[in-house]
Image: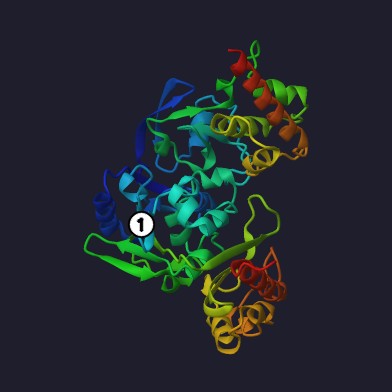
């Protein structure tokens, strides 16, 4: 039997107080595209629904020289309409145009997409290659968590029971090339089978820095550290990197077979997606 | 323990609709229980777009919104568009282009299209295709729906130019 209560908080501190009292039972309700689904499935049966959609505090965009910070309850549509995203983080804008579909984008929030902890969340791989951090607040303190340390397992994150994800901060890498590619079974409203993002820093055609992240190939979204290191160690030339076979990637990923694809298919397609994203990020023909 | 009920007022098609709901009641169920059965319940999971309404100027999935999140807000259903006597240009175009077969998806498509044209009066075919990508139709196959929305945009543009 379902048993829910509802809270329309007037401030973030009210939310944090409620989270302190309710712990796991304090269910943050923003876009509703995940939580209401879980309630209807019976996965979530009780608790206090805390509606954070009316809190302006969680809808701010701070644009500083080195980094852009987003309030956690900004919707994907609000991000797409933001001139800061369009101008300073155009690669993030490109990625968000592939997020679910326009109806979902009107409701789904950046914080929700992250805090849900899905291995195939549409925003994560690109945020990982950008070295994004999230700010978690409780009634007692606030802490900044690198996104690469945020995910623990499917649907599991390091957020404590009394914490709220309040902010997502994205460093601006002016000289980097960035590309994320999402592979779904169709274009609209598709869950991704596998997704990959790459960020490259190059200097006269030499690879100086590389970040590779993937979704849908492990229990959490991952950084492909082995593959990054192999490329940096062996292939300083950007052309060579883009033509590499990327064997080391297989050590980074641990895909499963499901309704959208087999583990074997994901192993193969991961290589192709990373190659394509890498070429695109490096400004080469894909 | 008794489930707690909460009072709310939602302004639906410019009329105040009052009720008492459970915390997790969706806006979709609230609307249908208050006789706005033109809002269709398809997948009830955010996948099909049949339940689309316009809330605060944006197309919204009423199945993925709680009624209490709509408290005090303006919500428009397909019945706000036109009447039998005077159809909205979008409705006229859907009829003219036979963009309706069984009709179950039409209220959602029409509201998504209305929100699109309100924000972008002359969209390209690609923009139309992208805008309706969250609405499913299992009868017509989308081409006629895209034709209809494109035609309605021109018709609305023409009327506003004459005015």
Q: Residue furthest front?
A: A204
How far from the left and from the top, in percent, is residue A66? Answer: 37, 64
User: In the displayed structure, does residue B112 sit left or right of residue B30?
Assistant: right
**Image location of residue A163, percent across then percent down:** 32, 62
The tally of labels here is 1
Dot 1 falls on a residue whose secondary structure is helix
Q: How is the image coloured?
A: rainbow
Which is more toward the observer, A172 or A78? A172
Q: Is residue B128 left or right of residue A48?
A: right
- Few, some or many residues within 10 Å of mark 1 (<14, 14–19, 20+): some
Q: Is residue A119 visible?
A: no
Pick whichever, A181 or A73, lies toward us: A181
User: At x 58% / y 64%, what residue is drawn?
Assistant: A179
Q: Name the foreground residue: B1 vs A219.
A: A219
What residue appears at the point 60 percent right and 72 percent down from the top-left corner? A217
Instruction: Report the residue at 70% width, 54% height from top.
Output: A186
Question: Which residue is denoted by mark 1 in the rendering?
Answer: A25
The subunit letter for the residue under badge 1 reads A
Q: Position of residue A169 (x, y in %)?
A: 38, 62
Q: Is residue A54 left or right of residue A215?
A: left
User: Which residue sits at x=52%, y=35%?
Assistant: B28
Q: Quadrant of residue A252?
A: bottom right
In this picture, is B35 found above or below B146? above
Vertical arrangement, residue B129 with respect to residue A213, above or below: above
Q: Is residue A66 visible?
A: yes
Q: Position of residue B118 (x, y in %)?
A: 55, 29
């Amino acid at each position: 039997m379902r048993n829910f209560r509802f809270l329309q908080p007037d401030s973030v501190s009210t939310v944090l107080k409620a989270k302190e009292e309710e712990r796991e039972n304090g269910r943050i309700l923003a876009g509703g595209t995940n939580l209401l689904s879980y309630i209807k499935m019976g996965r979530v049966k009780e608790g206090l629904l805390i509606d954070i959609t009316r809190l302006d505090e969680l809808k701010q965009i701070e644009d500083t020289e080195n980094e852009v910070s987003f309030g956690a309850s900004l919707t994907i549509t609000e991000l797409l309409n933001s001139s800061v995203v369009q101008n300073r983080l155009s690669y993030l804008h490109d990625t968000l145009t592939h997020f679910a579909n326009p109806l979902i984008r009107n409701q789904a929030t950046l914080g929700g997409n992250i805090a849900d902890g899905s291995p195939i969340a549409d925003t994560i791989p690109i945020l990982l290659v950008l070295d994004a951090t999230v700010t978690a607040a409780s009634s007692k303190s606030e802490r900044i968590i690198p996104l690469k340390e945020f995910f623990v397992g499917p649907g599991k994150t390091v957020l404590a029971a009394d914490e709220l994800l309040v902010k997502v901060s994205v460093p601006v890498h002016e000289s980097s090339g960035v590309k994320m590619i999402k592979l779904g079974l169709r274009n609209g409203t598709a869950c991704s089978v596998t997704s990959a993002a790459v960020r490259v820093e190059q200097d006269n055609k030499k690879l100086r820095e590389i970040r590779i992240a993937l979704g849908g190939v492990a229990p959490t979204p991952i950084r492909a550290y082995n593959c990054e290191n192999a490329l940096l160690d062996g292939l300083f030339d950007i052309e060579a990197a883009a033509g590499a076979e990327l064997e080391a990637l297989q050590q980074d990923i641990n895909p499963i077979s499901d309704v959208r694809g087999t583990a074997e298919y994901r192993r193969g397609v991961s290589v192709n997606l990373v190659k394509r994203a890498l070429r695109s990020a490096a400004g080469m023909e894909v | 323990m008794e489930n707690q009920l909460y009072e709310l007022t939602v302004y639906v098609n410019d009329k105040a609709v009052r009720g008492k709901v459970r915390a997790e009641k969706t806006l979709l169920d609230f609307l249908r229980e208050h006789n706005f059965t033109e809002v269709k319940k398809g997948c009830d999971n955010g996948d099909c777009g049949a339940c689309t309404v316009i809330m605060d100027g944006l197309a919204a999935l009423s199945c993925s919104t709680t009624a209490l999140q709509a408290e005090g807000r303006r919500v428009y259903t397909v019945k706000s568009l036109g009447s039998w006597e005077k159809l909205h240009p979008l409705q006229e175009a859907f009829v003219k282009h036979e963009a309706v077969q069984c009709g179950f998806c039409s209220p959602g498509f029409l509201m998504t299209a209305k929100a699109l044209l309100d924000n972008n009066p002359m969209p390209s075919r690609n923009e139309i295709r992208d805008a309706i990508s969250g609405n499913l139709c299992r009868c017509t196959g989308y081409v006629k729906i895209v034709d209809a929305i494109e035609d309605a945009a021109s018709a609305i543009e023409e009327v506003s130019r004459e005015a």
